């Protein structure tokens, strides 16, 4: 059996608007192996969430999705009908959302919402389903699980609700979990707990995990590989070590420069930032999308679309016209 | 839930008491009841005699409690016009109105909720346009005109349905349609708005991400939350139908409570009007109470604090 849990090739998401077509995601290719954590990082609006929704085939109706390949567990699900996709969702791949406060239906008990997933995919009901739901709640560290099953979402705190979401996603033991900023809405102390939990469960269930975040601290702690997104494109991809120790793309380097380091960042000094604005993604765009904010920008950067390229390592790819040696020597941002 | 029910019950009782006071005061607001009862040709002595006979000379609060006591026991006084007990009079007319009200609200809900849901699933589609057209029509058409049109087409031209009366269920078809169609637009629009709002929530996305069947997402997860405001609205509409179907009852000569209200108002039959107002208000209060309970049952956030 293949180790590759998810393979996405050339994903494009266009959203037609009154003012033109919004090219929200452009030529994104990803893959995740069993037991691997791929972190997708990037600022708000860079297409991270749409990428994850596109993989789940849960995009808003008017969004147009194009892909050249979409494989889950070695099987192509690209041509799946809506019905077949719904058999896969929540079963072979699950998703955890950003907002635990609103992601559960307020009108049904936790137990009800967990058991319906089991009923849908595993044809389980009654005591067996309830027991499994209870077991999963305990697994994600929820005490008094039996009692929680009978409670409604509004009776639980944000951290607990997110644990419930995780437990619910794990019920059918999916091969892949996509977590879209699962800790953004939570308290800092809870954030760490939830991340650790995700990491533990991933090892235990031997799943692929796609973690979408804009928090580089999170990435440093749990990523195996990192994909950096900017304005709808992946601008750099590599192992966590490569990205943190040897970032190549000027945007990644700028991003790293924004992290305050205790001891290195002087008190009273302004925190690092990347000057300029993200370009509008409405309408056609040629050339490097980061060019306007890049210190190394040349005429050639704006002349044609830049392809993601693999330097000699063959693992770390980056989307820039410059050579590795030029980038490494240049202190950007 | 018990606490919530008791709280609502207490509230309902207080509202009922207030309403009873207002409805009692109505008799005095218009004119001196003794003069009204005695008639135009009565002498001052006659009026005074009536005033003493009916106890109008006592303090108003005493009269109120006396009246309330009798009203609670089912005695709403005697009708000036019919010279019979008001409660018997109303009791005689209520079944017709109730039948019409129940039929009409059922028709309105059966028409508007599915249409509202269908419109929300595909906004701006053909079915949404049809729903919009039907609701604008329902809102704009005066009931009496619509009723007359139905009579002309269905009764006079096609001879399918009887024009007036309340003898068989066929007599109730047109009144039901007219009254129900009048209430449908608001329910339909509220269902549509509610569904649209709920369908864009995070928990619907979660339900879809869990791979649930579309109809489960729609009818279990979405509709359950979308109908909560609709329940309150339908209760008010139903209350309106039980009391205010004067136009419809008059046109179709259904001798119901609405028709009685119209008759009594034109005849200055104050005790009857007073009794009807009390009964209609109680309907509203009871319906609101049940709507609150239904909402609490639907929405655990109301039920469990």
Image (tube, grey):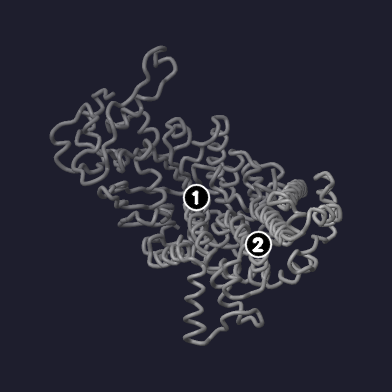
The answer to whether residue B199 is seen in the rendering is yes
Q: Which residue is mark 1?
A: B201
Q: Which mark is residue A71?
A: none
Q: Residue at x 70, y 54 (%)?
A: B285
- Would you place residue B158 above or below residue B14 in this image? below
- Quarter location, residue B93: bottom right
Mark 1 belongs to which subunit? B
Q: Quadrant of the C terminus of chain B?
A: top right
Identify residue for label 2: B265
Q: Residue at x 69, y 49 (%)?
A: B29
Residue at point 40% right, 45% down?
A: A49
Does residue A162 lie above or below B170 as drawn? above
Label 1, secondary structure: give it.
loop
Which of these two is toward me, B105 or A293? B105
Would residue B24 be found to the left or right of residue B181 on screen? right
Viewer-nearest residue: B158 or A223: B158
Nearer to us of marks 1 and 2 is 2
Q: Position of residue A186 (x, y in %)?
A: 54, 35
- A287 horizontally vs A88: left or right: left
């Amino acid at each position: 059996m293949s180790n590759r849990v998810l393979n996405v090739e050339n994903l494009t998401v266009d959203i037609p608007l009154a003012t033109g077509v919004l090219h929200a995601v452009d030529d994104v290719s990803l893959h995740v192996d069993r037991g691997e954590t791929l972190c997708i990082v990037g600022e708000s609006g860079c297409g991270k969430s749409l990428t994850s929704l596109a993989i789940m085939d849960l995009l808003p109706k008017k969004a147009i999705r194009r892909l050249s390949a979409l494989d889950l567990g070695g099987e192509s699900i690209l041509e799946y009908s809506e019905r077949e996709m719904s058999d896969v969702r929540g079963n072979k791949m699950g998703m955890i959302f950003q907002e635990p406060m609103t992601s559960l239906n307020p009108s049904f008990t936790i137990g009800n919402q967990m058991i319906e997933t089991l009923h849908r995919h595993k044809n389980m009901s009654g005591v067996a389903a309830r027991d499994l739901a209870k077991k999963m709640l305990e697994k994600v560290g929820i005490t008094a699980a039996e009692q929680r099953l009978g409670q409604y979402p509004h009776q639980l705190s944000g951290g607990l609700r997110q644990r419930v979401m995780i437990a619910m996603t794990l019920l059918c033991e999916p091969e892949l979990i996509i977590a879209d900023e699962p800790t953004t809405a939570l308290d800092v102390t809870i954030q760490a707990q939830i991340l650790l939990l995700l990491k533990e469960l991933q090892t235990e269930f031997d799943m692929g995990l796609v973690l979408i975040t804009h928090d580089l601290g999170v990435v440093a702690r749990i990523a195996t590989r990192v994909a950096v997104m900017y304005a709808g494109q992946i601008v750099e991809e590599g192992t966590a070590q490569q990205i943190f120790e040897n970032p190549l793309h000027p945007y990644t380097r700028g991003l790293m420069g924004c992290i305050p380091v205790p001891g290195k960042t002087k008190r009273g000094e302004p925190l690092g930032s990347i000057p300029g604005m993200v370009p509008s993604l409405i309408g056609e765009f040629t050339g490097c999308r980061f060019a306007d904010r890049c210190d190394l920008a040349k005429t050639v950067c704006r002349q044609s679309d830049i392809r993601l390229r693999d330097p000699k390592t063959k693992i770390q790819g980056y989307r820039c016209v410059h050579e590795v040696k030029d980038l490494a020597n240049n202190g950007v941002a | 839930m018990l606490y919530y029910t008791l709280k609502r019950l207490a509230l309902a009782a207080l509202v009922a008491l207030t309403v009873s006071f207002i409805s009692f005061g109505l008799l005095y607001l218009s004119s001196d009841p003794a003069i009204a009862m005695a008639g135009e040709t009565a002498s001052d002595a006659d009026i005074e005699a009536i005033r003493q006979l009916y106890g109008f000379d006592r303090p108003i609060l005493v009269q109120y409690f006396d009246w309330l006591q009798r009203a609670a026991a089912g005695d709403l006084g005697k009708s000036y016009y019919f010279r019979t007990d008001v409660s018997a009079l109303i009791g005689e007319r209520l079944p017709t109105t109730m039948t019409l009200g129940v039929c009409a609200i059922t028709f309105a809900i059966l028409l508007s909720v599915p249409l509202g849901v269908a419109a929300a699933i595909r906004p701006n589609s053909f079915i949404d346009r049809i729903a919009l057209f039907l609701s604008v029509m329902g809102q704009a058409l005066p009931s009496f005109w619509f009723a007359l049109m139905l009579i002309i087409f269905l009764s006079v031209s096609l001879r399918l349905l009887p024009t007036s009366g309340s003898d068989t269920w066929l007599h109730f078809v047109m009144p039901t349609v007219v009254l129900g169609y009048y209430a449908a637009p608001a329910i339909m629009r509220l269902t549509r708005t509610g569904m649209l709002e709920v369908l864009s929530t995070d928990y619907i996305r979660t339900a879809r991400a869990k791979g649930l069947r579309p109809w489960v997402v729609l009818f279990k997860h979405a509709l359950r939350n979308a109908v909560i405001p609709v329940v309150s609205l339908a209760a008010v509409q139903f209350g309106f139908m039980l009391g205010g179907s004067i136009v419809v009852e008059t046109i179709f000569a259904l001798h119901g409570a609405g028709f009685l209200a119209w008759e009594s108002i034109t005849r200055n039959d104050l005790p009857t009007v007073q009794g009807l107002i009390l009964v209609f208000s109680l309907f509203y209060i009871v319906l609101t109470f049940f709507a609150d309970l239904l909402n609490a049952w639907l929405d655990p956030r109301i039920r469990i604090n």
